Amino acid sequence: LCEVQIHLACIICAKTQGHQYYEKVRSILPQICIKKAKDTETAQRLEGFLVNRLCNSANSAALDALIERADGLMMYARLCEKNLEAKLKTNGKLSYHDVCELPQGLDGMYSEQFSRAFPDKNRDQAWVRSKALISTIVSAQEPLPTVLAKLALGSIKEEQDIALLFPIRDSRFHVLHKSVVDWLLTSSRS
């Protein structure tokens, strides 16, 4: 419930921004239908058809796809937001296909992020270097100071590779969520 409350301000802001366009369409649509239709009945049917199409937009379908993939986890929704923001920044637009390409659940999201950072974890030198840092972060009882990590491991160049799941705040490595550690500690990934 707390996670939902945190995001309420964003939801209200988005609703307010979208509402201005909705009001414009709602006020103009009947006028357009009357001008284009031959009679009142046709205008009403045309308006009904258009309203139905607008109410069942791609946004609704995209939202349904996101809800299905999230499995009720707000953390997944947050990671999806970051993922889609990056795609929007890169491509300049988003599509329903972009939403459908999102991985299923947190396991899928974590797997995708690690695959992106370490394409071939058996031969990738970045993985070999990062594995010691990740192990140190995961085994720490509290957020690991970056200075301590550098003292223990020497020079750290892997910060960017692991930044999504192990962000640095206040000069400390944090674990994004406990589920990241759980995911890493399963026998198939260790």
Image (cartoon, rainbow, N blue to C red):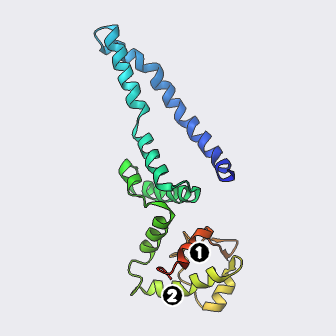
Residue under the point 63% across and 87% down: 150
Secondary structure beneath disc 1?
A: helix
Up-down relation of residue 150 to residue 39 (above or below): below
Secondary structure beneath disc 2?
A: helix
The residue mark sitting in front, 1 or 2, is 1
Residue under the point 42% across and 82% down: 121
Q: Position of residue 63 (x, y in %)?
A: 47, 45
Residue type, numbered disc 1: Val
Q: For residue 10, which quarter of the picture?
A: top right
Q: For residue 73, which quarter of the picture?
A: bottom right
Q: Position of residue 4 (x, y in %)?
A: 64, 49
**CA separation in Å, label 1 and label 2:** 18 Å
Numbered label attached to residue 181: 1
* Residue lying at the far front of the rendered structure: 187
Left or right, residue 170 beside residue 52: right
Residue type, numbered disc 2: Arg
The residue closer to the viewer here, 44 or 185, is 185
Residue under the point 62% across and 72% down: 175
Q: Position of residue 167 (x, y in %)?
A: 60, 71
